[in-house]
Amino acid sequence: MARKGQKFKTYSFELKKKAVEMRLQGIPKAKIAEELGIQDVGRLKVWMKKYWEQGDFGLMEHRGRRKEYKDLEREIKRLRIGE
């Protein structure tokens, strides 16, 4: 559980994408975390799940966005991937 005033480590889309690609190549989670400086190895599992469910879109930051914007961006991303 988060404590009041606690700061969370955030990771860029590029780093998440690289970690997912490394994992898909069969590299162990601990080695990926060490190489890329990821503090919580469990984050990789979460990123992998989001990647399998939503593709690259699942790795993007969505906090603070309105639902309409998210839905529109998701549709644009889906159309671009289909090209």
Image: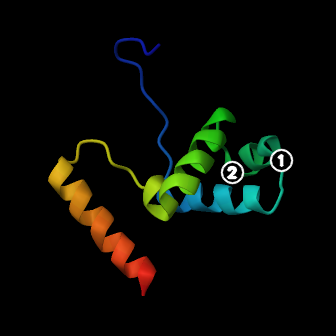
Instruction: Residue under label 2, please give it.
Output: 36
First along the sequence among labels 1 and 2? 1
Query: Residue at 16% across / 54% down in the picture?
Result: 68
- Vertical comparison of 5 with 9: above or below: above
Query: Residue at 35% across / 78% down in the picture?
Result: 79
Badge 2 amino acid: Leu
In the rendered image, the quadrant that contains the C terminus is bottom left
Residue 28 appears in the figure = yes
Badge 1 amino acid: Pro
Residue 72 or residue 63, whichever sits in front: 72
Q: Position of residue 21 (x, y in %)?
A: 69, 63
Residue 40 appears in the figure = no
Q: Position of residue 49 (x, y in %)?
A: 58, 46
Query: Residue at 42% across / 55% down in the picture?
Result: 60
The numbered disc on residue 51 is: none
| Residue 12 placement, left or right of 39 | left
| Residue 33 placement, left or right of 10 | right
Calculate the distance from the C-alpha at mark 1 to the C-alpha at mark 2.
Answer: 12 Å
Instruction: Residue under label 1, please give it.
Output: 28
Q: Position of residue 18 (x, y in %)?
A: 64, 62
Query: Residue at 19% across / 57% down in the picture?
Result: 69
Residue 23 lies in quadrant:
bottom right
